Amino acid sequence: MESKKPTPKSKIGLEPDEFKVWIKDATRGIVPTGGHCLHGCIYCFLQGNKKRLNINSSINFISEDDLRFGLDLLRQREEDGVTEPMYEIDIGSGGQVIQSEPFFHPYYSKLIEIGHEYFPDIGISTVTLGRWSKPEDFDLFRKANWKCHITLNTLDQEKRDYMMKGPDDLKGVKNLLAQDDLLNGLFMVFHGDMEIFKRDIEEINRINPNIIDHKDFRIWPTGYTTHTARNPDVLEMSALGIKNFKEMLSWCRKNKIKINPVFWELEDTMEMIPEGMTFSNHEEEKNDFERRINNTIKLIDDRRIDYDDVGWLLADSVYSFSSRFKDFINRINVKNHTFGGTVTAAGLLTRDDFYYAIKNHPVKYKYYVLSKDVFRIYHEDVMMNKFSSYDTEEFKFIMG
C-alpha cells in the first residue's frame, strides 16, 4: 500500500554552521535543497552514515533567501572568471551535504523557478528517486529546462517495501517516468532477482518506450562502483553476486537491452570464486598492490621504524591476496561501514571506516599504513574529509 507524503520536519532556512557547508556546494553549481531523507534504502551510504557511525551532515530545508544568496555568488564568480561558464546547474543533489529527496522540499518547484530566473539560458538538473513529484509542476519544469535522472530500486511494490523503509509513492514514480521530455536518464539498481528485473524492464518499456534505447539508461549492480581513485572500472562482488550478474548480462544480450558498455568487457574476465571472497577484475591491480607493499616496506626501513610498531589498514578488496605478506606485516581488515558493507573498493572507504577499524582492533600501533587509493583530487576521502588532518597524538599515518 502506498503511503501518504510525509510531513516535512525540517524548518525552512539554514543555520549559520549549515550555511557554511552548503555554500561550498552551491558555489560549484551543485545546490542541495536540504531536509532529512526518509527513503531508508537498505544499501544507501547516507543511511549508513547516520545509523552506523552516528554521522549526520543533513541540513534544514533551504529558504528562497538562501538560494538567492548562493546563486548571486555563483553568478558573480562566473562573471569574474573565477569559475568556468555554467552549462547546467544541479538543484537538488548534494556534495558535502547529505541530501534528501528533492521533492520532499515543501516548495521545490519555487526553487526551480528561482534557478531559471538566475540562469535562463542553461539547464537545471537533479537526481531523484521520483517520489512525491507533482504533476501540476511539470509545465513549470519544462519552462525552466529542468530534467532529472531517476534512480529506480524496482517497480515491484513488495521488493520496494523491503528495500526502502520510508514512505512510498510508486504511482508518482511511474508518472515521472512517463514524462519523456523531463528525463535525462534512468539508473536502475540490479538487486539479483532476475524475475523482478525482467518484469521491471517490461514495465519500463510500457510506461516509456524511449527510456532504455534513447536515454542515459544504466543498470548498476549493488556491488559495482565507479568511485575508486586510481581506476574507475572496478568490480567487487561475492561469488553469488557474480553468478546473478552474468545471468543478467546474458538475458540483456539475448533481449537486446542496452547496458553499460564496460559490463560487456568485464564479463569475459570473470572467474567463479569461493563464496564469501571478493573479486577484482584487474589482475594488474594485484601486481601493482604487491609492488606498493614492497615500496612501503622499504620506506619503513629507511625511516628506521620497527615493523612491530606498524599496522597496515587494508580494504576488503586487497586483504585476501595480501596473505603472502602476513608473516611480516600486521594486517588490519578495514570494512566499509559507511556505505553499508556492500562495496569493498578502497576509494569508497572514509576516515570513519579507518578509525573504526583502529578502535576495534585488539592491538594498537604507533603507525598505520594508509593506501593512497582513498585520496581524491584534493586529498580528501569520498565524503570530502581531508587526510592531512589524520595524524593524532596517539598515532601517525604512513601513506603507502
Image: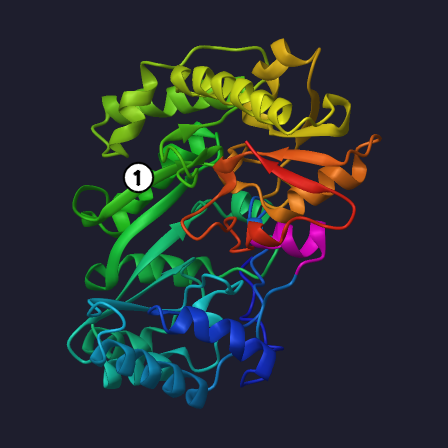
Name the amino acid type tagged 1. Glu
Asked if residue 321 lies left or right of residue 62, the reply is right
Q: Is residue 190 above or below residue 388?
A: above
Q: Position of residue 391 (x, y in %)?
A: 67, 48
Residue that appears at 43% across and 57% down? 129
Q: Position of residue 351 (x, y in %)?
A: 62, 47
Q: Nearer the viewer, residue 235 or 214?
A: 235
Q: Nearer the viewer, residue 294 or 233?
A: 294
Q: Nearer the viewer, residue 13 or 42?
A: 13
Residue that appears at 52% across and 11% down? 273
Which quarter shows the N terminus? bottom right
Circle 1 residue: 202
Which secondary structure is most common in the magenta stretch?
helix
Asked if residue 64 lies left or right of residue 72, the reply is right
Q: Position of residue 133 (x, y in %)?
A: 39, 69
Numbered range of the magenta stretch: 46-55
Which quarter shows the C terminus? top right
Q: Position of residue 50 (x, y in %)?
A: 66, 57
